[in-house]
Image: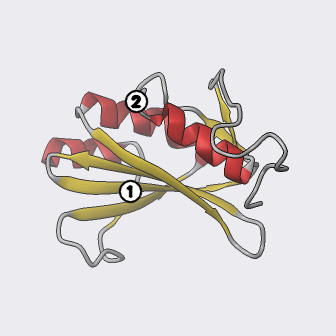
Amino acid sequence: MKKFLKELKKNNIKINTKSSSSIGKKDFYIETSQIDKTIDLFKEEKARLITITAYSNKDEDFFIYYHFDVKNSVFTIKIKLKKIKTNSIINKFPAACWIEKEIHEMYGIKFKGHKKLKKLLLSKKIKTPFLK
């Protein structure tokens, strides 16, 4: 774990452990441009993708949180999107496929590299993005 944390720091990924109330939980913010390198580091560490969450605030800023389990510690990667798009992680974590589809349907966030972003849950009659 120490080697993994050093590798994150070496790649300018700053971990914020003070914002967390849970033991073993680590949160950090990255720029959208850092997503590929960060995901590669988690894949190398044999991390397990727990889920991906998204939300938008009243200022219409969009955020994506990637939640991973690495050796019984929960890591949350937090990204504030400058545009309503980011790179897909399905090439490294195939379990992200349906979650990215749902986020796209609900928020209109585009995942570059995801070839099947189509309606998943809502009727074709309902205008999407639903939560934008």
Q: Looking at the image, is 115 positioned above or below residue 13?
A: above
Q: Is residue 8 or residue 54 the one in the foreground?
A: 54
Q: CA distance from mark 2 to mark 1?
A: 15 Å
Residue drawn 57% across and 32% down? 88
Q: Which residue bears the numbered disc 1?
A: 76
Q: Looking at the image, is 43 positioned above or below residue 20?
A: above
Q: Say which element carries label 2.
A: loop
Tally the marks.
2
Residue 7 position, x and y percent, is 28, 41
- Quadrant in which residue 27 is drawn: bottom left
Residue drawn 69% across and 72% down? 57
**Identity of the amino acid at label 1?**
Thr
Which badge, 2 or 1, is on the more N-terminal residue?
1
Mark 2 closeness class: few <14, some 14–19, many ≥20 residues within 10 Å: some
Q: Which residue bears the numbered disc 2?
A: 93
Q: Which quadrant: the C terminus?
A: bottom right
Q: Looking at the image, is 25 positioned above or below residue 113?
A: below
Residue 86 is marked as none
Residue 82 position, x and y percent, is 73, 53
Residue drawn 84% across and 45% down? 125
**Identity of the amino acid at label 2?**
Phe
Q: Looking at the image, is 92 positioned above or below residue 103?
A: above
Q: In the figure, is residue 119 to the left or right of 68?
A: right
Residue drawn 36% across and 76% down? 19
Residue 59 position, x and y percent, is 77, 73
Q: Say which element carries label 1.
A: strand
